[in-house]
């Protein structure tokens, strides 16, 4: 489709579309509508993932094993 547009004299149309795309990208990066950071949806997704990990650890009974391993590591570091 792009090749037929270029060969049939539609080169200006392709250049115009590229220019529009370029302006849109630049305005999103630098303009008023730029993505300034993570939004509510990203934070909510992250919280859901973290809650799922904690639920899985608790459900599998790994909480005691993990805390025991941390206590052993701390004891080794402080020489206790």
Image (cartoon, rainbow, N blue to C red):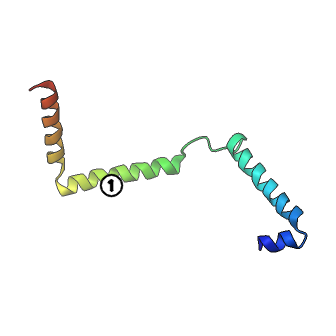
Viewer-nearest residue: 40 or 6 = 6
Locate residue 54 relative to residue 47 in the image: left or right. Answer: left
The N terminus sits in image quarter: bottom right
- Count of numbered tags: 1
- Rendered position, 36 above or below 76: below
Residue 6's image quarter? bottom right
Residue visible at 13% across and 41% down? 68
Query: Which quadrant of the figure contains the C terminus?
Result: top left
> Crowding near pointer 1: few (<14 within 10 Å), some, many (20+)?
few
Q: Is residue 69 left or right of residue 9?
A: left
Residue 58 x, y percent position in the rendering: 21, 52
Q: Image check: 69 left or right of 12? A: left
Residue that appears at 73% across and 41% down? 31
* Residue 71 x/y as whole percent: 14, 35
Query: Where's residue 52, x and y in %?
Result: 33, 55
Q: Residue at x 84, y 59 (%)?
A: 15
Numbered disc 1: secondary structure: helix
Whether residue 35 is situated above or below residue 18 in the rendered picture: above
Judge whether 27 appears above or below 17 on screen: above
The image shows residue 48 at horizontal and vertical percentages of 39, 53
Residue lying at 76% horizontally and 51% vertically, measured from the top left: 22
Q: Which residue is mark 1?
A: 52
Q: Is residue 12 left or right of residue 40?
A: right
Q: Nearer the viewer, residue 12 or 33?
A: 12
């Amino acid at each position: 489709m792009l090749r037929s547009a270029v060969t049939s004299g539609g080169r200006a149309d392709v250049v115009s579309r590229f220019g529009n795309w370029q302006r849109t990208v630049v305005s999103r990066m630098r303009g008023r509508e730029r993505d300034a950071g993570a939004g509510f949806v990203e934070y909510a997704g992250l919280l859901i993932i973290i809650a799922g990990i904690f639920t899985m650890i608790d459900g599998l009974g790994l909480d005691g094993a993990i805390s025991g391993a941390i206590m052993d590591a701390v004891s080794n570091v402080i020489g206790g």
